[in-house]
Image (cartoon, grey):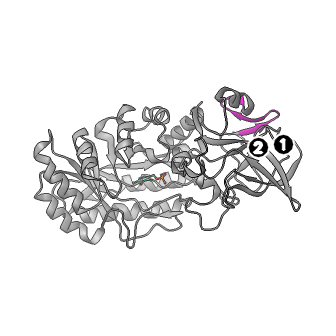
Amino acid sequence: MTGTAPRGHAPHPFFTVGAHGLLVAGQTLSELAARVGRTPFYAYERAAIDARIRAVRAALPREVHLHYAIKANPLPEVVKHIAGQVDGLDVASVAELRIALAAGAPVQEVSFAGPGKTDLELEEAARAGILINVESERELNVLSRLAPRLPGKPRVAIRVNPDFELKTSGMKMGGGPKPFGIDAERVPETLAMLARMPLQFEGFHIFSGSQNLQAAAIAEAQRNAVALAARLASAAPAPVRVLNLGGGFGIPYFPGEVPLDLAEVAAGMRELVAQRPPALRDSQYTVELGRYLIGEAGIYVCRVIDRKISRGQVFLVTDGGLHHHLAASGNFGQVLRKNYPVVIGTRPADSATEVASVVGPLCTPLDLLADRAVLSRAEPGDLAVVLQSGAYGRSASPLGFLSHPAPTEILV
Ligand SMILES: *Cc1c(COP(=O)(O)O)cnc(C)c1O
């Protein structure tokens, strides 16, 4: 598929700008906007989600289970759509747990990670019978205390804070001092404690970082995770039934970034499966992907309200902004602000361009969706579109800031 490519950005795998502007699920953006009825909105395309899941399934060895990490996009319709095509779901809160169960995910294949789980959250998760990735000894103690009142033994895996770091990851989640998981060197002691508790040990969760575009770095982190799990297995009170290798497959956001080489990641995983250490012979290897499954399938759409020229610079002032899409504004983990791919979705591909900045209605200079980007010339009424917006969009944004209405969402 040939996609649209805002200047300097990788061609988009799913969305094209044609003679009538951006096409979304076979309709023009104007048609879609009329159907939605108001701006701003997020739209997620079923066909794009399905194509991505098919590609991941086709590439990864069949022995590896594919989970969806709900926090990337917790819209219940999206979760339900994805649940039918993956092996399981991973949740990071009780609300996400309820969404996962409502989507019909098998309890055996739902897991719950995240630091700071409250006693009530742990109880609800244990009662549901899902796998709890424990992040501290306190969580084990709480579950152990609850266990006698529960119908079955709580199922637990240890989330390990590895003794290695993921190279070149956008957001590091492991290695060094971290609030996530239990330090690898302390895990043998933790396992000895767990062995005396009325809990069912099921395995390990080792996740080193999000938004990685380097296949070689992901493969190396996964190799390290398997080696670490094999070492820790000798101290475990039961066989390692699951080894969760986390998510972290990245997508290109910024000028110059190149899409992840999925084939190379898959080749690494085939090697891992072929060369299992004896301690992990019967372990179910799992990856839990968030961003990679949904990130490129979503767009954020806002309407140009005003066109202003300030000292020669064009500003397109829209009804959307950082309160809806913090990540695109550059304030969700970026070190140096760079533009997400942005297009004017109501203008044909061959329309005249200009350099313009796309801003929102908030009273802060941070409310910037595109900083001096090459865009089709737009007027009030046109629709500005941020691509790569399916993951960590609406749910990762400060919706309450300035009390504007929240954006709607639609699965098309
Ligand atoms: C956020 C998260 C994921 C998903 O990460 P992506 O980078 O979106 O693939 C997976 N597992 C855990 C524990 C997470 O916190």
Badge count: 2
Query: Picture coordinates of residue 331 (x, y %)?
Result: 59, 60
Look at mark 1 in the image and give the residue it sits on: 379
| Stretch in magenta | 16-28
Q: Is residue 165 left or right of residue 358?
A: left
Q: Amino acid at mark 1?
A: Glu
- Numbered tag placed on residue 304 in the rendering: 2
Q: In the rendered image, which quarter is residue 299 located in? A: top right
Is 331 within the magenta? no
- Secondary structure of the residue carrying tag 1 is loop
Quadrant containing the C terminus is: top right
Are the residues flagged by discs 1 and 2 in contact, CB closer than 8 Å?
Answer: yes
Q: Residue at x 19, y 52 (%)?
A: 143
Label whose residue precedes the other's in the sequence (1 or 2): 2
Image location (x, y in percent) of residue 313: 85, 59
Tag 2, which secondary structure? strand
